[in-house]
C-alpha cells in the first residue's frame, strides 16, 4: 500500500530563512510555495529528483500562520524539527477505508486537499509510535 | 546532491511491538534487523517498494540499547516519534567535504557504517532547523 516516502514535513519559525538554508545547502529547487489556511500553514516544497526513472520526493517546510494552530503549538512545545512523514499511496480513500477496518486511529475520515493538488489524509500518532503520518495521493502528473 | 528520501528513523520503546504494528498496518516487509553498538541501537528496516523503476525507501525503527545513548535520551526527553531523516547520495565522502566547505555543522567528519552495509554520516540539527539529518550512500545493490 505504501509506495515510497513522499515527503518529510519540517516545522520552522521562518519559512523564508528555512527555504534559503535548505535550497543553498542541498542545491534543491523550490517547486511550490502555498498557503493552506485549513491547516494553518504557509509551506514550501523542495524537490529531490531521483534520476530519470524514480519518482521525486520532497522536503516540506511548514511555517504556522498563527500560534494557535497545530504547527504553531508544535513549535511552542518542541521547537523546530521533524513534524510528520508523508507516504505516497495510489488511492488514499481506499487506504483510509482499509486502515479504519483494521482499527487504526485516523485524524481525517476522508481525503482532503494537500500540497500541489494532492489528496491527503492524516493518521493519528497514537497508533503509530508517536509519528504523525500522512497518506498522499499525488496530484501531479 | 540529495537523490531521494532514503528513510525516516523512528525512536521506539519496544522494537518488537513497533515492528509488528508497522508490518501489520502497512503490509511491509522487514528486510533487516541489526544491532549497531556504535550508535547504541537495535534497529529494523521495513521496505517500501516503489514499483519496478523506482528505488526503495525505508522505515527504520530504532530501540536504544540503554538509557544513556542518543536514542535513549531522545526517548526520555520527547517520547516515541520521528528521530531523523536520511537522504540518499551517490558519494557520502564527497558530500561531506562540500558541506564542510559551506560551513555546515557536521556530526561525523567522515563516513561510518550504517544499516545494510551503507556508508552514512550525520549532520547537526542546529544548522538544519532542528532536523537531525543523515546522508546515506546505500550499500545494497
Image (cartoon, coloured by chain):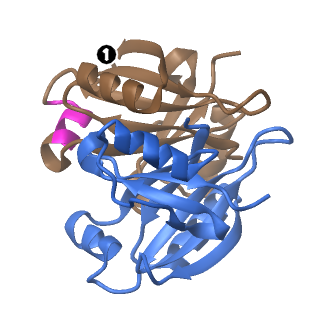
Chain colours: A brown, B blue
Residue A139 lies in quadrant: top right
Residue A58 visible from this viewpoint: yes
Position of A104 relative to B75 (above/below): above
- Read off the magenta span: A68-75
Q: Measured from the top left, where is residue A101 in percent x and y?
A: 63, 52
Is B61 displayed left or right of B99 in the figure?
Answer: right
The extreme right residue here reads B52
Q: In the rendering, at what x and y percent does residue B21 appear?
A: 56, 67
Q: In the image, is A132 to the left or to the right of A69?
A: right
Quadrant for residue A80, please give it: top left
Q: Position of residue A118 (x, y in %)?
A: 57, 21
Query: Which residue in the structure is indicated by mark 1?
Result: A37
Residue B47 position (above or below residue B44): above
Q: Quadrant of the C terminus of chain A?
A: top right
Dominant secondary structure, magenta: helix
Give the answer, above or below, for where B49 lies relative to A109. Answer: below
Amino acid at each position: 500500500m505504501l509506495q515510497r516516502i513522499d515527503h518529510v514535513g519540517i516545522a520552522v519559525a521562518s519559512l523564508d530563512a528555512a527555504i534559503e538554508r535548505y535550497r543553498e545547502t542541498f542545491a534543491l529547487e523550490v517547486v511550490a510555495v502555498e498557503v493552506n489556511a485549513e491547516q494553518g500553514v504557509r509551506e514550501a516544497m523542495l524537490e529531490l529528483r531521483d534520476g530519470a526513472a524514480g519518482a521525486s520526493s520532497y522536503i516540506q517546510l511548514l511555517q504556522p500562520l498563527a500560534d494557535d494552530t497545530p504547527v504553531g503549538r508544535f513549535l511552542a512545545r518542541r521547537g523546530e524539527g521533524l513534524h510528520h512523514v508523508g507516504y505516497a499511496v495510489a488511492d488514499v480513500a481506499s487506504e483510509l477505508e482499509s486502515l479504519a477496518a483494521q482499527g487504526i486511529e485516523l485524524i481525517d475520515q476522508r481525503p482532503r486537499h494537500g500540497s500541489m493538488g494532492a489528496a491527503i489524509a492524516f493518521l493519528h500518532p497514537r497508533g503509530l509510535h508517536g509519528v504523525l503520518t500522512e497518506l498522499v495521493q499525488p496530484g501531479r502528473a
